């Protein structure tokens, strides 16, 4: 069955209508993460906020990506 036929089929049918259908037990889990608190100077926060605004990346995500970059550099040594 090609993609188009398969798409057409599922447009007209629901999985629940098949007697052998049952919900799977597959669960997607994120790896656990730990929260750290970080004190920064107001000037540093302004720099982070400016970069965050320019890139459109959330402040926490931006800092996390910078930390990950540094960790990757250290691991390559």
Image (tube, rainbow, N blue to C red):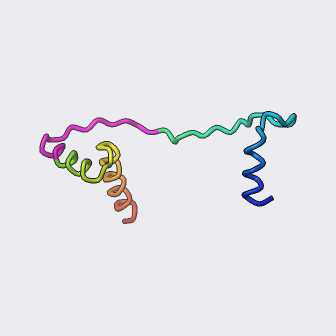
Is residue 76 rendered to the left or right of residue 41? right
Which residue is drawn at the image coordinates 36% and 53% (left, top)?
A: 68
Residue drawn at x 82%, y 34% as measured from the top left: 17
Question: Does 76 sit above or below residue 43?
Answer: below
User: Residue 59, position in %: x, y?
Assistant: 29, 43
Q: Quadrant of residue 42?
A: top left
Q: Nearer the viewer, residue 13 or 23?
A: 13
Q: Nearer the viewer, residue 55 or 6?
A: 6
- 5 within the magenta span: no
Residue 73, located in which quarter of the rendered image? bottom left
Where's the N terminus, which quadrant? Answer: bottom right
User: Magenta includes 45?
Assistant: yes
> Camera-side residue: 1 or 67?
1
Picture coordinates of residue 8, whole percent (x, y):
75, 50
Task: Characterize the magenta stretch by its predominant secondary structure.
Answer: loop
List the single residue furthest toward the right.
19
The residue at the far bottom in this view is 77
- Residue under the point 38% across and 59% down: 72
Tell me which residue sits at (32%, 57%) in the image: 70
Where residue 64 sits: x, y (%)?
Answer: 34, 47
Q: Is 19 displayed left or right of 41 in the figure?
A: right
Magenta highlight range: 33-46
Q: Position of residue 16 (x, y in %)?
A: 78, 34
Q: In the picture, residue 74 is in which quadrant? A: bottom left
Residue 24 sits above or below residue 67 on the image: above
Q: Give the total of numbered labels.
A: 0
Identify the residue at the far left of this view.
43
- Quadrant showing the C terminus: bottom left
């Amino acid at each position: 069955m090609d993609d188009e036929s398969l798409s057409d089929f599922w447009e007209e049918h629901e999985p629940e209508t098949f007697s052998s259908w049952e919900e799977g037990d597959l669960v997607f889990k994120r790896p656990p993460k730990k929260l750290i608190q970080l004190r920064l100077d107001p000037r540093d926060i302004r720099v982070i906020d400016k970069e965050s605004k320019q890139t459109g990346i959330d402040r926490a995500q931006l800092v996390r990506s910078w930390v990950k970059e540094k960790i990757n550099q250290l691991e390559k040594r």
